[in-house]
Amino acid sequence: MRITHPQAAYRGIAPENMFFVYSDTQIQLGSGHLISFMQPELNPARPHHIYMQIDAQPSAYGLLLGALLARAEVLSAQNPGLPARLYTQLSPDDRQLLPFLHSCGMANDDAEDLVAFSTAQGAFARPPMGVQYASVPLDSQARSDGFAARLNAMRISPIQPDQLTLWREQPHFLALGFYKNNRPVSELLICGTGKSATLVSAYTLRDFRRQGMARNLILLACGILHDQQGVETLYANVFRKNEPQAALMKSLGSHFVKTVSLLPGMDL
């Protein structure tokens, strides 16, 4: 087997971060890539994230993993003094790759869980003092793009413009925020149909955290969903290693529904 890079960027990935494995008869056996990005909001202790994806036959997986681990070390070294984390995403039902990754030094210490909580608790929610409560203005492309950009600054998977357009057509679409001096303090995005809806994203600016802003805003949204739109349940995805996010969901009385994906990784 031999491993190579593409000659140019491949699907937006830099050639040095993209690997292909071929057999001795020139049959492609798999590919793997890394995506390096900074996300200080979700994990301030390790703001440098390196996502690894491998799609390969079992015979080629080990070779690709070795090459990607070596490349991840190089990417981490490009930002000396900045802690990094290498991770990948697996199905909760994957019983083969997880033990192999564990034997290579990757810990199964993070996952994305789906949780749910009742919207009935929002009946008596009130906006906090000192901020204005309003729907997010989305009456122009620039304002829609700005809202998506603010949400994406706090997310791993970015919200694309076409996704936002589709969500706005759903009956339970809500884009709400708290504002101070006409500047966002905390905002959220919810969409859905029927008796349930999904909390797609919510954030609070660093200077206003630990004041219950996000929880208060979610409860106000719950009041609207429950009283005006007949929604009974609100779902949300939570990363286990994100302690503030998990604590917020617990404070809302959420219960575990299922594990969406496993996120094994290692610190670099």
Image: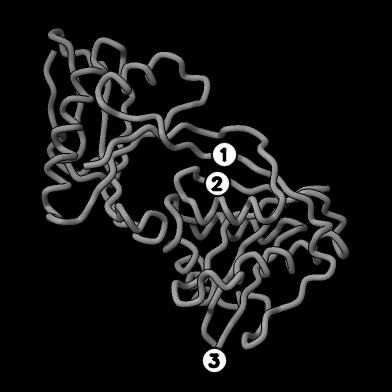
Q: Which residue is mark 2?
A: 238
Q: CA distance from mark 2 to mark 1?
A: 5 Å
Q: Nearer the viewer, residue 41 or 2?
A: 41
Q: CA distance from mark 3 to mark 1?
A: 36 Å
At mark 3, the secondary structure is: loop
Q: CA distance from mark 2 to mark 3?
A: 31 Å
Q: Is residue 17 above or below residue 180?
A: above
Q: Amino acid at mark 3?
A: Asn
Q: Is residue 9 above or below residue 120?
A: above
Q: How would you rate the neighbour count of disc 1 (Cα within 10 Å): few for under 14, some for 14-19, many for 20 or more?
A: some
Q: Nearer the viewer, residue 149 or 215?
A: 215
At mark 1, the secondary structure is: strand
**Point 31% across, 22% down: residue:** 101
Q: Is residue 190 above or below residue 67?
A: below
**Point 47% across, 19% down: residue:** 94
Image mark for residue 201: none
Query: Is the C-beta separation of discs 2 and 1 under 8 Å?
Result: yes
Percent x, y for residue 149? 45, 67
Q: Amino acid at mark 1?
A: Asp
**Point 16% across, 28% down: residue:** 67
Percent x, y for residue 83? 23, 51
State which tag comes first along the sequence, 2 or 3. 3
Q: Is residue 24 left or right of residue 36?
A: left
Q: Which residue is mark 3?
A: 181
